[in-house]
Amino acid sequence: TSIPLLVFAGSTRAQSWNRRLAGAVTQMATAEGAQVTRLELADFDVPLYNADLEAKGTPRDVVRLKEIFHAHPAWIICSPEYNGSYTALLKNTIDWVSSPIKGDPNWSSGTKPFEGKVVGLLATSPGALGGVRSLSHLNPLLLNLQCWVAPRQYAMPRAGEAFDPDGALATEAHRNAVHGVIQQVLWATQRFQD
Ligand code: FNR
């Protein structure tokens, strides 16, 4: 059976390198037999989190986004690095979606709603470190949510030279590293389902 995999970037910028990386991941994971949902955070109107807003009723787009996150057993995040960490967009998204869906029959209090989600982490940036410090902050965030974070991770340096004009990864080193993350995510998700 094909694994439902959610792939998204922590950037909404039109020319985003991480959105481009998410595109390459989509191609590669689809070739591996995953059933990929390529999510664009720009398609959702999500305000900055404020518990008062949530108390008045979760905004429509947040509900849609939340359902997508909860429905996928596996995610791959392509993370930009801002000031040595991940983006406010990623944090805001996770803060909104990480609470339980009311009436979800698969969730019992005493567990966390994202317990056992398998998450693969990738980053890219124009710099020499590829945004690796964003990953060092995303790891504890996801572990706190009880996600199973794939130990294989990759921060791809010099994003400006890393893609072919068609959006594919330009070097074998990049392809192998990204492929390794995808394979480990699919492998773990399969085993969690057994
Ligand atoms: C950056 N950038 C950046 N890059 C990096 O490697 N380490 C960093 O700490 C930062 N810090 C940073 C802060 C802020 C506020 C901005 C706007 C940018 C550069 C960043 O990697 C670059 O803009 C990427 O292109 C952003 O990712 P996307 O949008 O291309 O996916």
Image: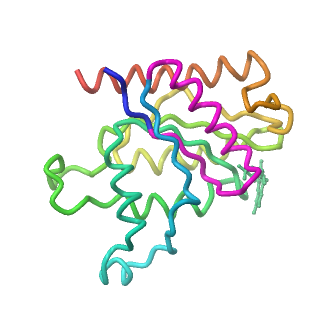
Across and down, in percent, residue 33 comes to 45, 20
Residue 12 among those drawn in magenta: yes
Give the quarter of the figure containing the N terminus. top left
Say whether residue 166 is left or right of residue 136: right
Going 58% across and 62% down the picture, which residue do you hit?
89
Is 136 in front, or is 125? 125
Across and down, in percent, residue 92 comes to 51, 64
Going 22% across and 20% down the picture, which residue do you hit?
194
Going 65% across and 57% down the picture, which residue do you hit?
12
Across and down, in percent, residue 57 comes to 30, 78
Say whether residue 132 is left or right of residue 151: right
Q: Residue furthest right?
A: 161
Magenta residues span 6-33
Say whether residue 40 is left or right of residue 71: right
Q: Is residue 40 above or below residue 63?
A: above
How many marks are shown on the rendered structure? 0
> What's the coloring here?
rainbow
Q: Quadrant of ligand 1?
A: bottom right
Across and down, in percent, residue 135 comes to 60, 43
Q: Is residue 171 above or below residue 140?
A: above
Q: Residue 62 occupies which quadrant of the picture?
A: bottom left
Residue 10 among those drawn in magenta: yes
Q: Residue 21 occupies which quadrant of the picture?
A: top right
Is 109 in front, or is 72? 72
